[in-house]
Amino acid sequence: YGPAQIRKNVDDVRHAFSGLPVTLLYALEANSNRAIIQVMAEMGLGAEAVSGGEVFRAREAGIEPQKIAFSGVGKTDAEIEQALEAGIGTIIVESLEELKVVEMAAARRGVRAPVALRYQPCIALGTHPYLATGAKATKFGLEKDAVVAALDAVRRSASLELVGLHAHIGSQIRT
């Protein structure tokens, strides 16, 4: 967790993706220590937050709001409102129901909500069951038919703007 090692790791990842149009985000659920987040902010990284508290910590540590992605299955209506008020860059939508909540909140504010759709690829990997997020049996994301419906809903909406597609298949993948 030392700053020198963090900087080296970030530089290594940047080198691996050099020449590609990517924005690196630090997942605050890994460690939301303010000093670590500040190093990430100093290096120009964004943040992935899974709660309103993490959005607050990222902003407090200097992460630019447009570089924050708000993900997770437990977002409350109030947290979605706060994310829109903060002007964060992406709300990662997990379900058609959540997409409707985001759309209504954006319409009330008179803004277009930047959304990414979390795709559920239905890929089972040999990871710990508690860390598997890409298998069909998990609660994370939209399966293929729901992604198509969500894309259609975004296209018809004056309050939603599609900014990406998101997928996460799990952690501690060894093969």
Image (cartoon, rainbow, N blue to C red):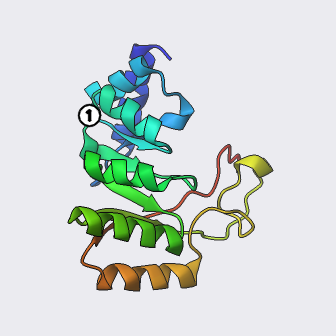
Residue 163 lies left or right of residue 96; in this view the side is left
The residue carrying pointer 1 sits among few (fewer than 14), some (14 to 19) or many (20 or more) residues within 10 Å by Cα, namely some
User: Would you place residue 160 above or below residue 83 in this image?
Assistant: below
- Dividing the picture into quarters, in which one does residue 134 lie? bottom right
Give x and y (percent) for residue 148: 47, 84
- Three-letter code, disc 1: Gly
Q: Depth check: 125 or 47 in front?
A: 47
Q: Residue at x 43, y 49 (%)?
A: 79
At a point 49% along the width and 67% down the height, the residue shown is: 98
| x and y percentages locating residue 86 in the rendered image | 27, 45
Give the residue pinned by disc 1: 44
For this view, does 37 lie left or right of residue 172?
A: left
Residue 142 quadrant: bottom right
Q: Secondary structure at mark 1?
A: loop
46 and 6: which is toward the camera: 46
Q: Position of residue 125 (x, y in %)?
A: 73, 58
Q: Position of residue 92 (x, y in %)?
A: 44, 59
What residue lies at 67% left-to-right and 70% top-to-bottom? 122
Farthest residue in the left direction? 110
Pick whichever, 122 or 117, lies toward us: 117
Residue closest to the eye, 87 or 125: 87
- Compared with 27, 92 (above or below) is below
For the point 71% across and 46% down, the residue is: 174
Residue 164 seen in render: no
Drawn side of residue 3 relative to residue 1, left or right: left
